[in-house]
Image (tube, helix red, strand yellow):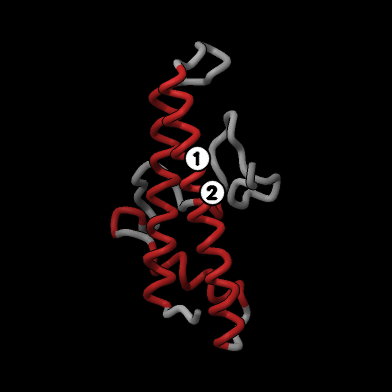
Amino acid sequence: MAHTFEELVAKQRAADEAHARVLHLRDTYGAPTAAPWTQAQTDTYETAWRAWRDLARDTQAALTEYAKDEGKPRNAIEADLRRAAKTPEETPGTRSGSGSGPAAGPASGSASGSASGGPPSGD
């Protein structure tokens, strides 16, 4: 199915929101090695992490398809997408908390992304 750029922006924003949720939970719960998490905390975190992973994967697949359909370099489309998906408080010079989303990779912790800083890999 062909995607519009607006659909890609919506997908990227959803992935960014899911990433922010993962980071918030990690900040709230603390490192699981410092103080063990309850089963409810573990389940909540893992659910949020999987949602982020799935949204990031779907966004990347749609981005690849869109770039191919448009006949443009994927990296150029991705850069345009990142700029378009930013909310006003995430513009350069200000910081809203979670960073730029899955392509920036998660913060250090138990559920890290790839060494290249991409979205988390599957379970």
The residue lying at 38 percent from left, 49 percent from top is 17
Amino acid type, mark 2: Arg
Amino acid type, mark 1: Trp
Q: Is mark 1 on a helix, strand or loop?
A: helix
In the image: residue 85, left or right of residue 106: left
Height in image: 15 above or below 50? below
In the image: residue 63, left or right of residue 10: right
Disc assigned to residue 49: 1
Contact between labelled residues 1 and 2, with CB atoms less than 8 Å apart: yes
The front one of 50 and 21 is 50
The front one of 89 and 116 is 116
Q: How crowded is mark 1: few (under 14 residues within 10 Å), some or many (20 or more)?
A: many
Height in image: 97 above or below 60? above
| C-alpha separation, residue under disc 2 versus residue under disc 1 | 6 Å
The front one of 46 and 22 is 46
Q: In which quarter of the image is residue 111?
A: top right
- Image quadrant containing the C terminus: top right
